[in-house]
Amino acid sequence: MSLQPVLLAGQWRAAQSTGSFRAANPATGETLPGEYPVSAWADADAALTAAGGSAAILRALPDDERAERVARFLNRFAERLEARSAEIVDLAHLETALPKKPRLADVELPRTTNQLRQAAAAALEGSWALPTIDPKINLRSILAPIGPVVVFGPNNFPFAYSGAAGGDFASAIAAGNPVIAKAHPLHPGTTRLLAEEAFAAVGEAGLPAALVQLLYHLEPESGLRLVSDPRVGAVGFTGSRAAGLRLKAAADAAGRPIYLELSSINPVVFLPGALAERGAKLAEEFAGSCLLGGGQFCTNPGLVILLAGDAAEHFIAAVKQRFDAATPPPLLSSGGQRSLGESVHALQSAGASLVTGGAPLPPPGCRYANTLLRVTGAQFLAAPDKLQTEAFGSTALLVVVRDGKEAAAVLAHLEGNLTGSLYSDTAGADEPLYRELAALLRPRVGRLLNDKMPTGVAVSPAMNHGGPYPATGHPGFTAVGMPATLRRFAMLQCYDSVRPDRLPVALRDANPNGRMWRLIDGQWSQGPCSGK
């Protein structure tokens, strides 16, 4: 069987490979058709050279023309994905075992096309670049394209986070950069279909042919070399902490910006008044969130803090009942099943006792029992690092603390997370404790929620899908929420006394489109700059 071609330098061509791999259906264990290359460094080198040439072409375009072409590409790409949606959804279902409906067809693919269109709108409007003008001294600055961006897609979102279509991809392109997409080996065929439509849209938009390139897999050493190459402008990565930190070390050593989304256990605190007021409803809400999609979400609630008492025990019993009654769906791979088992074992070795689950399920499919574990607050405080091991699946650790003081101590030992949720009663009895605990939780999470589960990440300009390490590699950036996402893939450029006709159009006195917000003499304005 011949290897699938890679997309390099404006053409689909045979890879220079060091090996090959095939995807498997995690619902059946069946090996799927299609053999994909593990690219040698020569492929990555060729991609970098071609991307550098595309970046030079993009930089040479007037800013407004580049934005128009990029927006045309993103909008056309979204249309092409919608036209081919049935085929794309069918293949993603085979490679991931995620349900066609509603997950892939009705939720994730529309989210992906929505992100592409939002990125197009941000590119056209232009405020994302934060044009800033000090007319008194004729000093002007703007965010501009940073250069070729490498995007590593994760295993759990084959569309919305894909290296060839997801949020990082859309943001990097909208900011004016070419992208080298690194597919996830669990769904290479799906990524190939996405890249085919992206490549077709590139031609329709009149952009450089190597704007989008695709590599399926690399040896670890080549991946490290890729992210640290001086031709790279920036890197976006979503995946495991171990792999992400290896890439970060290589990129950091070479001074290459890298934006990571890593692990998160997303703590949820149920205050006593909330449990007393609506404990049964909260058990149902929590179980639904934790079990959603087999728990394979980066915002899956994996740590629960409860104050000891009858209400807490009733809550635990109700959650156990729901966990036991729900049929676990297939995990994304046999490797995911194995990793989940190792994480559960690590939690038990650190002192957690099993409430339910805790074992892989027999074939067909890569499945693992819905799992609840529990510890006391004292046990958690004795081994906080080990008891924050991420278990990527329908698994949660319940921490039952003696009182508010111990709850505060637990929160004080938490690592950085994407989200943190606090549930309180509606009558105000929990308010003093809420204020104390929220103050501790707030700096440890990117998104703070009240009376709401964290699963579900709205594609909104106000969203922060980021947080302190180890949730991400940098707490100042988000992977979701345009236009902020574009700013990761840009460099700040300053113009000092540069003649007006030599300035980017966004920095000239006239507002180029009348809609762009610019900071002029310390005031945000959509009007012209009146000069000195």
Image: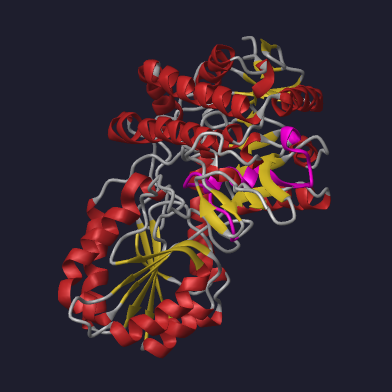
Looking at the picture, tell me which residue is in the foreground, 307 or 43.
43
What is the number of callouts on the image? 0
The residue shown at (36%, 50%) is: 456
Left or right of 354 in this view: 525: right
Q: Nearer the viewer, residue 246 or 518?
A: 518
Is 22 one of the magenta-colored residues?
no
Q: How is the image coloured?
A: secondary structure
Residue extent of the magenta highlight: 475-502
The image quarter containing residue 18 is: top right
Residue at figure coordinates x 67%, y 26% from the top left: 62
- Measured along the vertical axis of the image, is residue 356 above or below residue 403? above
Q: Is residue 491 above or below residue 263?
A: above
Residue sitting nearer the eye, 398 or 75: 75
Residue at screen point 80% across, 38% down = 225
Instruction: Kindly identify the residue that appears in the image at 22 percent across and 81 percent down.
Output: 273
Residue 186 visible? The answer is yes
Q: Is residue 402 visible?
A: no
Instruction: Judge whether residue 493 is colored magenta.
Output: yes
Nearest the eye: 113 or 490:
490
Vertical placement of residue 211 versus 415, above or below:
above
Horizontally, is 61 left or right of 415 in the view? right
Say if 87 sits above or below 240 in the image.
above
Residue 426: x, y in percent? 19, 76
User: x, y (%) of residue 36?
Assistant: 62, 20
Q: Quadrant of residue 178?
A: top right
- What x and y, as percent, mark residue 342? 53, 56
